[in-house]
Amino acid sequence: MKDQLEALVLQMYKSGIVYSDAIHEFRRTFVATVIRENNGNQLRSARELHMHRNTLRRNISEFKLDVKSLRQIPPRRPPQAERPIPSGKKQRTP
């Protein structure tokens, strides 16, 4: 992992990214990844980041993160009318 990080830093350095911008982007990506891994749960994310939830909220505001878009929403069940009929059961008629 250290080699990958060094390669990334070298690539950023050679492309002319300023240190402050690199740090900002790293923090933003790190926080967003932890929130995504916790399915948008901010309290759990704050605990894993070892910060207070209010600090996490400030970071979310600072980085302009949309927490709802970071949630991994499970697929919804189709409406009952579109579900396959299991064998051996009769279909209800309205």
Image (tube, rainbow, N blue to C red):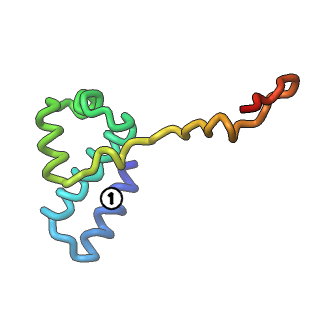
**How many marks can you see?**
1
- Left or right? Give the position of 21 relative to 37: left
Instruction: Provide residue 21's location: percent of width, then percent of height.
Output: 17, 64
The answer to which of 61 and 75 lies nearer the viewer is 75
Residue at point 83%, 23% (across, down): 89
- Residue with the most extreme bottom position: 15
Residue identified by numbered label 1:
6
* Location of residue 67 with respect to 24 vertically, above or below: above
- Left or right? Give the position of 59 relative to 34: left
The answer to which of 37 and 39 lies nearer the viewer is 39
Residue at point 76%, 31% (across, down): 93
- Left or right? Give the position of 60 relative to 75: left
| Picture quadrant where residue 46 is located | top left
* Location of residue 63 with respect to 88 vertically, above or below: below
The answer to which of 76 and 66 lies nearer the viewer is 76
Residue at point 37%, 34% (across, down): 38
* Location of residue 79 with respect to 47 vertically, above or below: below
Instruction: Provide residue 63's location: percent of width, then percent of height.
Output: 18, 53
Instruction: Provide residue 81's location: percent of width, then percent of height.
Output: 68, 38
| Picture quadrant where residue 71 is located | top left
The answer to which of 41 and 51 lies nearer the viewer is 41
The image quadrant where one finds the C terminus is top right
Residue at point 59%, 36% (across, down): 77
Task: Identify which amino acid the numbered label 1 is placed on.
Answer: Glu
Q: Residues within 10 Å of mark 1 (few under 14, many from 20)?
A: few
- The kind of secondary structure element at disc 1 is helix
| Picture quadrant where residue 57 is located | top left
Instruction: Provide residue 62's location: percent of width, then percent of height.
Output: 13, 52
